[in-house]
Amino acid sequence: MTDSPSLGQVKVEGEFATLVFERRIRHPIEAVWQAITESDELSKWYFSRGTIEARLGGKVDFSLGPAHVTGSVLIWEPPRVFEHEWIVDRPGFPKEESGVIRWELDSAGDETILKLTHRKLPGPSSRNFVIGVHVRLDRLEAFLDQKPLPFWKTHLDDVQARYLDQ
């Protein structure tokens, strides 16, 4: 994991926001692709349960506690691009927290440049989402490095402080 990963960017345009992250991960593209697209791998760092039908038009289904995310695969170009809808169903929250997530991977020798973009996110939700996505990417890197995953709540508080300081 990088010592101090760069903060994600939030670009608000009208009612919607786009989150953009770019990370250089010290693992080959195939390992990163596997971690972001295979159910066994996803369950270890991303969600408590996640399934992806690995094809264009396939379904995505992720769960974490009370939140449930569904959608369809919009782009499937292994091992470079995976884009899917992000439709959230969370008790007590509006179903407006939706959008499109795009994972782009570029090989850089033994490393991978990962660019994650979350588009069409309602502007008011973007500040909370950028922190959560940052923590998930930190967990991805720790998982790939075979290090203990950062404890969600403690790490979330630490990352949130970094965003408040900017």
Image (cartoon, rainbow, N blue to C red):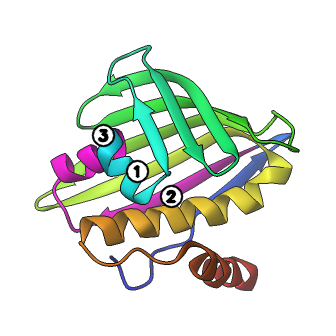
Callout 3, which amino acid?
Answer: Glu
Magenta-drawn segment: 17-37
Instruction: Classify mark 3: helix, strand or loop.
Output: loop
C-alpha span from label 2 to label 1: 21 Å
Instruction: Classify mark 1: helix, strand or loop.
Output: helix
**CB-based contact (under 8 Å), mark 1 and mark 3:** no
C-alpha span from label 2 to label 3: 21 Å
- Residue that mark 2 sits on: 21
Q: Please name which of the two marks, 2 or 3, marks the residue nearer to the observer.
A: 3
Instruction: Relative to 62, say whether 64 is above or below.
Output: below
Q: Is residue 11 left or right of residue 31?
A: right
Decide which of 12, 157 is in the foreground and name it: 157
Q: Quadrant location of the N terminus?
A: bottom left
Q: Residue 31, position in %: x, y? A: 19, 52
- Residue at the spot 63% in from the left edge and 76% down from the top edge: 153
Q: Please name which of the two marks, 1 or 3, marks the residue nearer to the observer.
A: 1
Q: Residue 81, position in %: x, y? A: 34, 34
- Residue that mark 1 sits on: 43
Callout 2, which amino acid?
Answer: Phe
- Residue at the spot 88% in from the left edge and 44% down from the top edge: 92
Decide which of 120, 52 is in the foreground and name it: 52
Q: Residue 119, position in %: x, y? A: 63, 39
Instruction: Classify mark 2: helix, strand or loop.
Output: strand
Instruction: Relative to 9, say whether 42 is above or below.
Output: above
Callout 1, which amino acid?
Answer: Ser
Q: Quarter-wise, where is residue 7 in the image?
A: bottom right
Q: Between disc 2 and disc 3, whose residue precedes?
A: 2
Q: Please name which of the two marks, 2 or 1, marks the residue nearer to the observer.
A: 1
Q: Is residue 42 left or right of residue 94?
A: left
- Residue that mark 3 sits on: 38
C-alpha span from label 1 to label 3: 9 Å
